[in-house]
Amino acid sequence: MRKAIHILLLFITSATFAQTSISGVVTDEKGAAIPGANVSIEGTYDGTSTSVEGAFQFETLETGAQTITITFVGFKAFSQAVNLSGQPIQLKVSLKEEINQLDAVVISAGSFTAGEEKRRTILKAIDIATTAGATADIAGALNTLPGTQKVGESGRLFVRGGDGSEAKTFIDGMLVANAYSPSAPNTPSRGRFLPFMFKGTSFSTGGYSAEYGQALSSALVLDSKDKAELNQTDLGLLSVGSDVAHTQVWDRSSVSGKIQYTNIRPYFGMINQEIDWITPPASIEGSTAFRQEVGEHGIVKFFGNFNHSDFKLNNSDILNPNQKQLFGYANNYGYGNASFLQALNDSWSVKGGLSYNYNENNILFGNSPVDEVEKGTHSKLVFENTLSDRVELKFGVEHFQSSYEASRLDSLLKQQTIAFNTPITTGFAEAEIYASKYFVTRAGVRTEYNGLMEKLSVDPRVSIAYKPFTHGQFSLAYGQFRQVAQNEFLRVNQNLEEEKAEHFILNYQVINNQRTFRAELYHKRYSNLVKFMNGNPEQLTNAGNGYAQGFELFWRDNKTVRNLDYWVSYSYLDTERDYLDFPNASVPGFASTHNFSVVGKKFISEIKSQLGVTYSYSSPRAYNNPNSEVFNNGRTPAYQDLSMNLSYLPKPFLIIHLSVTNVLGRDNVFGYDYSETPDTNGNYLSRAIRQPAKRFLFLGIFFTISKNKSVNQLPNL
């Protein structure tokens, strides 16, 4: 018995002597104490938590080589190897902040993004598709956001004092030439691509990434959907045509196809039009998409689109309305896009693609036929590397190759042809650096070599964001941007240099509890704009310049009222240009000082319907009256439009959709055309540029065939 007691005492004494005391202090990188951090020996239950002062102390019976770990939410885990031999161990540990992409500050200056979780959400595809008055047109919906101007006779995106040619569209990173369908003079065109094709939308009104070029004012970046998940067939009967689409899904791939026929001729026959149509517009369009998953995290995408449309009308002479001139337009369009994304390892990924554009216009003006053919390819390769949770690097190369040819018969019936190629080779690099989750900098540079001009350019771009509050943040952005002159000017002078713009942006944004508030100030400086020498359109230079500046407000709330989502936007624009045939700096005719929009969408469950309402206002726009001695001193009436739509779901797979623009029938005037010569009294007569009709009424019945009976086409409307 005595021997057993001695053995027990020996074990107790040995254990007492083998205990090791571990103590220390845990702080952040600024030296502030971190209370509540977990301190433990890896693989054991020994440990403790830090006090309010960040201090800790505990004992352990473990011996030999061990690992001490310290963890705390929002910081990187700390590990240190130690040798436990009974001697006290004291540590002083500084935890490094962990950048959580969902909570960290993001670059928001000049950018409205949707689809990427870490970038938050502004407009999704269904937002675009169901905005009243937009009739499922991407540009139509984006024109309700701040920074855009309503230019009803164009329908394109006019951003912050830039004209419609300065906003470019990219699909999966690839430039899309001729992104809008053709239209009659002074009538709005539509985008060629529908919003439901895309999982993510980034609409940048300035200060965008160095990855995107040849866009002077705005970049609309669309990311197409990945592999489809469900077999389905969609049928649509429309007041202006019909469509049919089918999607087939396999284990790791999917293919989709759609054919749409649009014929507005019967509709125009019933609704009185301002335009003297001979043959109203009709078109046939087809598209297909193939998706193939590759490896664990890779995907290859193919997308193709073709379209044929045509129309004819009479243009009446302003001095003599009985004298008419034929205007005919036929367009053949094709677009193909192949892209891929592949993760190389945990930190490296590569993406790229190849696109092809074909656009052919056959124009008949009086007895003078003009044919235009524009072809273009865009190839691109981009590498991305996550160096750490604080540094992301992106760099790549791309090549644009465009060719343009125009031919016409002159007065002697001789064929006159003009053709030129514009090759542009580009390299870009950009780094996004998180100093902390409250402060991020994105700095990049873009170099371009224009083969037509044989000139190299370098454009720096930088954005900074600071998040001093839990939900609010500030952003700054600066960048230089350029794009080649339009083909109509290069036809005259192929030595024209690229037009340029500088962007300066200050932004404040709060996103909290399904509510968004944005306020933004900006200033743009234009240089190298195309200018007519002595007002002669056959003598062109790059002597033009200008500026645009203003502020914008945006508020969105889909939380306060159940089943109601609405947003309000306001833009103030101060801009002048001295370009084209302007005798002096003046406000361009497409710019309006004040732009205001309210968009609301309410789902009414009792009647299984979604109601959409949009109200838009634009202040008067400038126009030049040749009867006045002062250039551009005329002002149009203010633009106002109240549009509504209703989607009724009698069955989950059946939708009846009704859309009406300009419900109140306001006579909006977008400007005036003047006669080329004065009348007998020496006055130039005018004709107002109006909407083709006061309202546009659309009715569609959409039916979906699928195993999942709850699937429908509501996101596609």
Image (cartoon, helix red, strand yellow):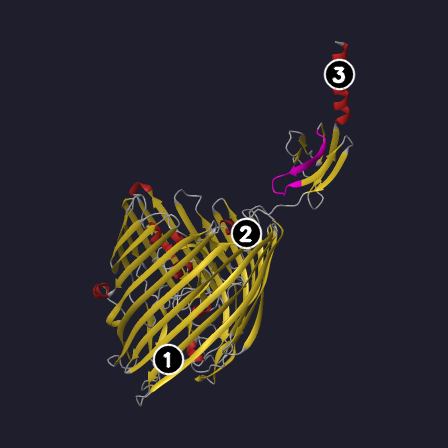
* Residue 345 numbered tag: 2
- According to the picture, the residue beneath numbered tag 1 turns out to be 406
Residue count near mark 3 (Cα–Cα under 10 Å), binned few <14, some 14–19, many ≥20? few
When the figure is inspected, residue 278 is found, relative to residue 256, above or below; the finding is below
Residue count near mark 2 (Cα–Cα under 10 Å), binned few <14, some 14–19, many ≥20? few
Say whether residue 126 is left or right of residue 430: left
- According to the picture, the residue beneath numbered tag 3 turns out to be 7
Closer to the camera in the image, 561 or 394: 394
When the figure is inspected, residue 200 is found, relative to residue 681, above or below; the finding is above
Residue in view at x 55 percent, y 48 percent: 101
Q: Give the extent of the magenta segment.
A: 62-78
- Dot 3 lies on which element? helix
User: Along the polypeptide, which appears first: circle 1 or circle 2?
Assistant: 2
- Dot 2 lies on which element? loop
Nearer the camera: disc 3 or disc 2? 3
> Which of the 4 image quadrants contains residue 301?
bottom left
Q: How far is the residue under mark 1 from the one under mark 2? A: 49 Å
Say whether residue 2 is left or right of residue 37: right
- Dot 1 lies on which element? strand
User: Could you tell me which quadrant the N terminus lies in?
Assistant: top right
Q: How far is the residue under mark 3 from the one under mark 1? A: 105 Å
Across and down, in percent, residue 70 comes to 66, 38
Across and down, in percent, residue 327 comes to 28, 77
Q: Are marks 3 and 2 in contact (CB under 8 Å)?
A: no
Q: Amino acid at mark 1?
A: Ala
Q: How far is the residue under mark 3 from the one under mark 2? A: 57 Å
